[in-house]
Image (cartoon, rainbow, N blue to C red):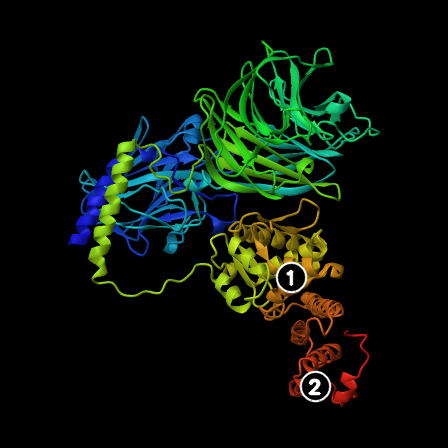
Amino acid sequence: MMTKLYFWSAVIILLCCCEKSFSQSYGLGFFSHEVVQDQRTGLDLSPGKNLCFEDGFDLSFDLNFLPKRDDYFGYILRLVVNNSENIDLLYDNDFKEKHHFKVIVGNKFSKIAFEIPPATLYHNWNLVKLKFDAQQSLLTLTSGSYTGTASVHLTKGSCFKILFGANEYQQFKTSDNPPMKIRNVKITENGELKYHWPLDEYDGNSAKELIHDNKALVNRALWIKKMHYDWQRLGSFVVKGPASTAFNAKNDQVYIVERDSLKTFSVSDTKIKSYPFANKLTLLRGNYSLYDERNNRLLNFYADQKIVSVFDSASRTWSKDYNPKTPITDNWLFNKFYSPKDSSLYMIAGYGHFIYKNQINKYHFPTGQWQQVPFTGDAFTPRYLSALGQSGNGAYVIGGYGSSTGKQMLNPRNLYDLLYFDMEKKTIKKLYELKVGGEDFVFANSLIINEKENKFYGLIFPRHKYDSKLQLIVGSLKSPEYKLSGSKIPYQFHDINSYSDLYYSKSSKRFIAVTTFRDSTDKTHVNIYALNAPPLEAPDKLFAENSPFWYWFSGVFVVIMAILFFVFRSKKAVKTVVHRPVQVVTEINMDVKDAVGTEDVVKETKSSIFLFGDLQVFDDNGQQITKQFTPLIKELFLVVLLYTIRWERGISSDKLKELLWFDKSNESARNNRSVNIAKLKSILDKISNCQISKETGYWRINIDPAITYTDYQEYVNIIKDKSRLDHEKIRHLAAIIKRGPFLPTVNYEWMDSFKAEISNEIIDTYLHFSHSVGVESDPELLIELSNYIFYFDSVNEEAMVIKCKALVFLGKHSIAKNTYENFCKEYKLLYEDDFSKSFSEVLASSPGQVK
């Protein structure tokens, strides 16, 4: 009794203080036709049972469609009455239809048919209410100003199965659902709220019900709150040369300018298209791109040559080319914007040849003139790695890294001032300086300015780290305050070889982050991420909009209730075993206590892939998802992963057919490949920055090692350069192979070569390192190395010699003799012949193998 009292008291208080919090961005999104059928989202309000009502009930929910999808057909809601008849609310996307929302009763269309205007359907929540009257056997649906009725077969005490989206319920299964969002599902009986599912979860496969704790089941959830906190990687690919990027907000497209073509990446459907140039564009390091929304044109420019080239999309030509015979640029990582007021491109600050800059350069399109803009006002410290956001009459510039003299060698430092550049007055005004505590940071290239709310949005990161992280910052244009929002984005920062930018899509209300990294082979790695607006500070920040009093009071009240509740429960408490969710950490810690590096990597990266020992794949939450791989999906995953890591470029479609679908026609193999790759993608989506792609013409699995640990990748990194072996790498290799042989329970014919090669490489690696270790300096290490070799080759003569000599040096003569005798027995069993050397000959053998 006391427990129920505490519970309902807490619920009442929380409902009062949380009423406003439900105005936040939350709800359940539904995966739809963009994924295969068994990966689409479904919501079951009463898993394992039906909901029964004496006379009738009202069902209401908020509905919204996800914009810019290819196909919207499908079932929004299916009610199954007494396990015998279906009542469906569906969306028919036939363009010839006037009313796209329809209600079906059994196998017939009812008279209920209505429309929600696209502007409202895609951008606002729309209340839909269904009233079931058992006495009159009547269904009444209300949406906006529309009300329609239909006859239905209802009786007193009817029981309902209520299903949103895709479902697998008995003979009423359906896999077609539109890409939608719903929230605030409520059921009222006799005017009293009986059930309420807010659908405001951040993660998981269940949805809480506030009145009777009647949890709903969600399959393949797309939680809206999570989309406002976790950055979703939309695409990752590699292009040739020193590429640059721009964003067309009107079409929701990221442009990637490379040497011979323009790539367009659609952030709404993640489709990539490539348009080869009809003329030459000599891209140089330090080129930058910008999309001019006013004139609908893509610009590429190189400040050193004072050239701005305009792309003609119809002819696929550039207006100008650059001179390839020029020194490396003197203008890196400057800020830029296009001003329609004076038809000019502005470039501000930057860096080059150990000098930070504070110049403002301007290119005037009508005259083709390039000039340096003089300015007055407050001091503008020379800098780079600052952020710029355009406003009506100028631009805001914040932060960066530089020095008062502009010279890199004279006391450079992080800068945190917010400045405003007025184009008309040609003045710089300092608005304030951020008060920063903790780690220093710099900015990605652009700011998103919201002058209506006096806010700015930017991306920050520490410039002193190579494996860095981008973090969204929300600041004020009026006062020096800011907060961090959203999750972090992995970012490889190598100064002028790296670039990051932030854009905003008004149509989809999403922030778009783009990172580029140019590697030593002159290839640029491009990553594109998206985050729904408004961003959340933390996934559990449910009361952000409440008044301070309710925020404080509800917190104190809940703490008190919790204490009383647990005091009451403690009298009946029983001991329970708490299992750690990340089982792999425990296993590694137990098996490899002396391993250098592996333990830390696995602790920091919950997601991991293990190929040594049994195949194990863990998602971002540390949960094992290996069982989700069917036999064919597993083989597809392994062959693409191994070819990616071993040969970097990946595997061709022809090779995949040869290995997996050799007995099928080209068309059948292609269809099989498409279906199974789609299924594999849906599994890999559970691992951040782990994607299968074909941007290079070869199938690859791209994995961010900073997020996901892959033991085979670590293994390859160690053995590929034997000249750099040291004790740390040797022990790291030991930590990897101690889990077991390479995929011992996986037997594919094509994998035999991998397994044989790995065994030979490990043996050669340990033998190679043993040659650098003297018996006198570290005999214990030599014994350990020999044991590692025996793990893969029990009759390796050189390992036996090394171990025996090391044991003798330690005075363990009898153990050395036993080692020799065991070796001889193994040798006899394998070769059916006696080993030719005696124990004394082994000890007296040439020291060339071991010092």
Precedes in sequence: disc 2 or disc 1: 1
Name the residue type under label 1.
Glu
| 3D distance between C-alphas at marks 2 and 1 | 29 Å
Picture quarter containing residue 298? top right
Above/below status of 344 relative to 474: above
In the current view of this chain or complex, which residue is farthest to the right?
325
- Quadrant including the C terminus: bottom right
- The secondary element bearing badge 1 is classed as helix
What percent of the width, then of the height, locates residue 669? 65, 55
- Quadrant including the N terminus: bottom left
| Lateral position of residue 374 relative to residue 543, left or right | right
- The secondary element bearing badge 2 is classed as helix
The 10 Å Cα crowd at callout 2, few under 14, some 14 to 19, many 20 or more, is some
Identify the residue position indicated by label 1 in the image.
Answer: 728
What percent of the width, then of the height, locates residue 807? 68, 81
| Lateral position of residue 500 relative to residue 306, left or right | left
* Relative depth, front residue between 453 and 493: 493
Residue displayed at 79% across by 26% down = 322
Name the residue type under label 2.
Tyr
| Lateral position of residue 707 relative to residue 87, left or right | right
Above/below status of 207 relative to 483: below
What percent of the width, then of the height, locates residue 145? 31, 26
- Pair 2/1: label in front: 1
In the current view of this chain or complex, which residue is farthest to the top?
425
What percent of the width, then of the height, locates residue 397? 57, 23
Q: Which mark is residue 820?
A: 2
Residue displayed at 80% across by 77% down = 847
Residue displayed at 59% across by 58% down = 597
